[in-house]
Image (cartoon, rainbow, N blue to C red):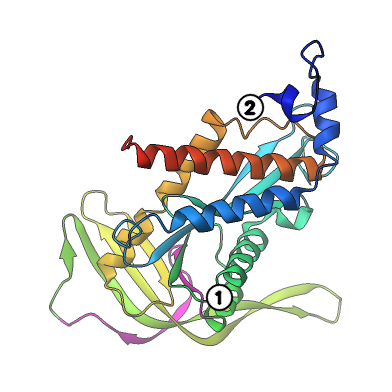
């Protein structure tokens, strides 16, 4: 992109970083957001149902960009004194379907960032068959209950040995379920527990475990090579245990996408230290990413 043309500079003028940063801080990011959403809606239809799997698998995760020069005006504080910006992306395996920019301190936790990013996308796609695939950063039973209440399907990798009550097992006795080097140890309908804050007479707060009445599904598989267990929680009861495992494995696609954004499109370099400018840059980066991915597909470049 010719920055001189973008910012209306003559050939003899130099595009200083400070000038670019100032200009970005004044551009309306909603303009670029609208362009990004229009491109996504138009070109996501190019891909067949076979290509986007039986369901739209939306991989959701966050990546952070740190301010190396301590000039970021608004960001999540770190112990080092530096600030960082969190980008929570939704990725359908082919194109980036959503992004949220977080700079407030509460979003340092994925328990705050990911549910907000997911529910904002759900509002944009009222009628969908999406399943949201999420890593261990989100473990809140309350968030899972909220997702289920809004008919948001999800597969979350759970922390091992979390507290639950088994309501029903879907495994047949004496018929072990295996594929390749994997064995299903548990496939059950369960109720989960969550911590409720209780304040004692001295004013101190502790948490009491309370059972949530919403029913979820717990799938536990074990690698026969490493003996490592993987726990998955979902509100999807129609898929097989193998499908749930296979769908979660596709979450790795978003990690590859993050590397593409940071290494090839330089997302990790903050041109602007202003939140407005950062939003403009992330939408411009997403537009560029989609155009590149669409070009690769149309030319069979992998």
Q: Position of residue 30 (x, y in %)?
A: 74, 53
Mark 1, other Cα within 10 Å: few <14 / some 14–19 / many ≥20:
few
Q: Quadrant of the C terminus?
A: top left
Q: Quadrant of the N terminus?
A: top right
State the image quarter where residue 170 is shown.
bottom left
State the image quarter where residue 234 is shown.
bottom left
Position of residue 296 in the picture relative to residue 277 (left or right):
left
**Can residue 214 be seen in this snapshot?**
yes
Position of residue 36 in the picture relative to residue 154 (left or right):
right
Residue beneath the point at 17% across and 70% down: 177
Q: Which mark is residue 1?
A: 2
Per the image, is 156 magenta? yes
Question: As rendered, which of 112 and 174 lies closer to the eye?
Answer: 112
Residue beneath the point at 86% across and 39% down: 73
Residue under label 1: 126
Q: Position of residue 96 (x, y in %)?
A: 52, 50
Q: Position of residue 74 (x, y in %)?
A: 83, 44
Per the rendered image, the range of residues in magenta is 151-173
- Earlier in the chain: of badge 2 and badge 1, it is 2
Position of residue 176 in the picture relative to residue 15 (left or right):
left
Per the image, is 230 magenta? no
In the picture shown, does residue 153 fall above or below 1? below
């Amino acid at each position: 992109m010719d920055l001189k043309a973008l910012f209306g500079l003559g050939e003899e003028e130099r595009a200083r970083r400070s000038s670019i940063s100032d200009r970005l801080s004044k551009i309306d990011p909603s303009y670029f957001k609208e362009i990004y959403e229009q491109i996504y809606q138009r070109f996501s239809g190019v891909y067949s149902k076979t290509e986007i799997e039986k369901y739209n698998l939306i991989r959701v995760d966050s990546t952070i960009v740190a301010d190396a020069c301590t000039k970021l005006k608004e960001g999540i504080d770190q112990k080092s004194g530096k600030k960082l910006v969190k980008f929570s992306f939704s990725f359908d395996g082919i194109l980036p379907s959503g992004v949220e920019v977080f700079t407030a301190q509460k979003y340092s936790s994925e328990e705050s960032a990911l549910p907000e990013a997911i529910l904002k996308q759900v509002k944009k796609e009222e009628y969908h068959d999406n399943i949201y695939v999420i890593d261990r950063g989100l473990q809140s039973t309350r968030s899972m209950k909220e997702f289920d209440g809004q008919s948001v399907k999800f597969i979350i990798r759970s922390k091992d040995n979390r507290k639950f009550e088994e309501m029903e097992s879907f495994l047949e006795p004496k018929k072990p379920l295996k594929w390749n080097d994997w064995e299903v140890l548990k496939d059950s309908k369960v109720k989960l527990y969550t911590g409720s804050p209780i304040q004692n007479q001295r004013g101190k707060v502790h948490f009491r475990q309370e059972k949530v009445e919403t029913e979820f599904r717990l799938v536990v598989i074990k690698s026969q090579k490493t003996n490592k267990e993987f726990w998955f929680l979902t509100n999807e009861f129609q898929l097989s245990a193998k499908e749930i495992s296979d769908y979660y494995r596709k979450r790795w696609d978003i990690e590859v996408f993050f590397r593409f954004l940071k290494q090839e499109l330089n997302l990790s370099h903050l041109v602007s230290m202003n939140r407005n400018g950062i939003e403009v840059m992330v939408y411009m980066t997403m537009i560029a990413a989609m155009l590149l991915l669409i070009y690769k597909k149309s030319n069979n470049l992998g």
